[in-house]
Image (spheres, rainbow, N blue to C red):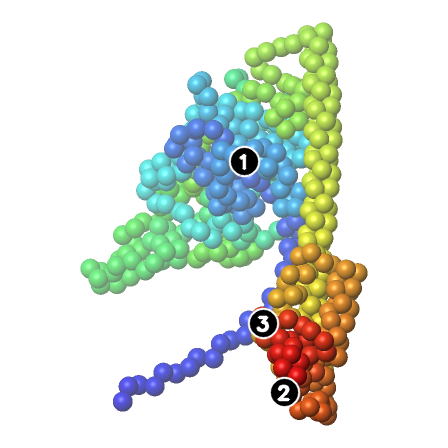
């Protein structure tokens, strides 16, 4: 016998609870990183590396097309709590990086002088320190040498700081700080260097062998007779530890992820570069989102008169755009009104058609009922079944020509005609045929209403030819 098939009971899907983001996540800065235009595969990879830096408060898997405009990203910024828009582009001279503060600006445009991808930086490292869990929390931002009263320095400092969530020193957990973003400003040429590191704490004051036992897997001791040989052979201190700066040695206030990083232990902070590495210089600062008054430009300087002319030109263009927008809005409303009127007319025509069809069906039903009444009346008066299509043929003939009161009059005339026929035939219920005293069958036929034979002449009371011949013989 074939094995029985077990019927699996379908589990009822429990209603999902409405999940809402915590208030801290809503207040945290969020970013969208995209590229605009034809940038090439390397700039596209650089864009993906920059998304990796901005995790977890960014759209890591966002797919944008050429049809998506900047207005599209600005329109969704509010509901998704997006505060910054980062765009990579490329021109004939160099690639560019634009950072926009949503929804009203400003926009900082940087010219990318040099860059290195994450895969290039990680590939040259002897010991790589990359794992997915370090991207579950936002990085720590370190700004170096950005002190100054210049407008560009203030705006750059504010923009870079607000791109990442702030840290509360009293409540922060050390396990959440696993990455660092370093931004260094070079006043000599006005360039900014961007680097991305992984933070790691290693124990200090122990030999290299003990450090291996504490912070990594147990080494292979198959060729040694005792573990003391492994420790003595390695020496007291490691070579890298001798080069450590004493300023990097700290006493941990909390436990950290990893072996040997316990609270109260003395450890050294190590930074391992993850990439990407970007060297860029500020070119332009605009007041709005990629379109507005230029607050700073590195290569072009305008006088006050030129700035005034540019403002007037921009204001005129804004008024023209507003005027065109109003005209388009009025045309759109007019089209909607015409469309609504056409729809109403169509609905009225459909309603009239439905009423006409319903009235035609009602008239057909009335005619059928009238035919049934005529047939019933014929049976009751004549005592015979009416011929086939007797009344239907008449109804069809009068249907096209008569309607309303004319149909009623035709019905009355039909009724009168039937009454006259009944009176002439004398075939009412319970009535016999009466004969003449002479017993002449022709006389009987005449009284019964039957038609005389053709060819005879009516004379006297008999009304046919046979009666005249009898009288001449007499």
Is residue 104 found left or right of 232 in the rendered image?
right
- For marks 1 and 2, the one nearer the N-term is 1
The residue carrying mark 3 is: 454
The residue carrying mark 1 is: 68
The residue carrying mark 2 is: 441
Q: Residue at x 43, y 25 (%)?
A: 114
Looking at the figure, which quarter contains the N terminus?
bottom left
Q: Nearer the viewer, residue 468 or 220?
A: 468
Element class at badge 3: loop
Residue 369 appearing in the image: no
Residue 311, numbered label:
none
- Position above or below: 442 against 207: below
Q: Residue at x 69, y 35 (%)?
A: 335
Element class at badge 2: helix
Q: Nearer the viewer, mark 1 or mark 2?
A: 2
Specify the quadrant of the image occupied by residue 310: top right
Specify the quadrant of the image occupied by residue 315: top right
Q: Nearer the viewer, residue 454 or 368?
A: 454
- For marks 1 and 3, the one nearer the N-term is 1
Q: Residue at x 51, y 51 (%)?
A: 136
- For marks 2 and 3, the one nearer the N-term is 2
Residue 369, image x and y in percent?
70, 73
Element class at badge 1: loop
Could you give the CA–CA distance between mark 2 and mark 3, rounded to whole angstroms?
17 Å
- Structural crowding at the residue carrying mark 2, measured as other residues with C-alpha within 10 Å and reported as few (<14), some (14–19) or many (≥20): few
Q: Nearer the viewer, residue 377 or 211?
A: 377
Q: Residue at x 54, y 74 (%)?
A: 12
């Amino acid at each position: 016998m074939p094995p029985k098939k077990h019927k699996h009971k379908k589990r009822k899907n429990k209603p999902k609870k409405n999940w809402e983001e915590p208030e801290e996540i809503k207040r945290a800065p969020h970013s969208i990183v995209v590229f605009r235009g034809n940038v090439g595969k390397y700039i596209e990879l650089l864009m993906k590396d920059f998304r990796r830096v901005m995790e977890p408060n960014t759209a890591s898997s966002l797919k944008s097309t050429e049809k998506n405009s900047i207005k599209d990203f600005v329109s969704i910024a509010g509901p998704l709590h997006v505060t910054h828009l980062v765009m990579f582009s490329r021109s004939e001279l160099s690639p560019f990086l634009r950072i926009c503060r949503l929804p009203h600006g400003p926009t900082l445009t940087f010219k990318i002088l040099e860059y290195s991808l994450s895969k290039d930086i990680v590939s040259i490292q002897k010991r790589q320190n990359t794992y997915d869990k370090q991207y579950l929390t936002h990085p720590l931002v370190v700004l170096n040498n950005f002190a100054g009263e210049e407008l560009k320095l203030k705006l750059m400092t504010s923009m870079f700081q607000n791109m990442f969530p702030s840290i509360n020193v009293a409540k922060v957990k050390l396990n959440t700080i696993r990455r660092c973003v370093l931004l260094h400003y070079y006043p000599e040429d006005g360039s900014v260097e961007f680097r991305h590191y992984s933070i790691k704490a290693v124990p200090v004051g122990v030999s290299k062998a003990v450090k291996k036992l504490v912070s990594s897997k147990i080494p292979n001791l198959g060729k040694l007779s005792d573990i003391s040989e492994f420790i003595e052979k390695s020496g007291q201190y490691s070579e890298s530890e001798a080069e450590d700066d004493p300023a990097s040695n700290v006493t941990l206030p909390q436990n950290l992820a990893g072996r040997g990083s316990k609270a109260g232990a003395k450890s050294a902070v190590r930074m391992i570069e993850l990439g990407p590495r970007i060297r860029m210089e500020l070119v332009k600062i605009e007041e709005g989102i990629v379109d507005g008054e230029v607050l700073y430009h590195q290569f072009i300087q305008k006088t006050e008169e030129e700035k005034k002319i540019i403002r007037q030109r921009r204001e005129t263009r804004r008024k023209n755009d507003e005027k065109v927008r109003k005209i388009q809005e009025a045309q759109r409303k007019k089209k909607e009104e015409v469309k609504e009127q056409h729809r109403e007319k169509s609905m009225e025509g459909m309603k009239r058609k439905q009423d006409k069809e319903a009235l035609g069906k009602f008239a057909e039903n009335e005619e059928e009922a009238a035919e049934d009444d005529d047939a019933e009346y014929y049976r009751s008066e004549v005592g015979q079944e009416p011929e086939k299509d007797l009344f239907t043929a008449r109804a069809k003939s009068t249907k096209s020509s008569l309607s309303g009161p004319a149909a009623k009059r035709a019905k009355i005339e039909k009724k009168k005609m039937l009454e006259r026929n009944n009176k002439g035939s004398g075939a009412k219920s319970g009535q016999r045929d009466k004969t003449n005293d002479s017993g002449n069958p022709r006389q009987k036929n005449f009284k019964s209403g039957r038609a005389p034979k053709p060819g005879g002449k009516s004379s006297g009371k008999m009304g046919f030819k046979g009666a005249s011949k009898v009288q001449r013989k007499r």
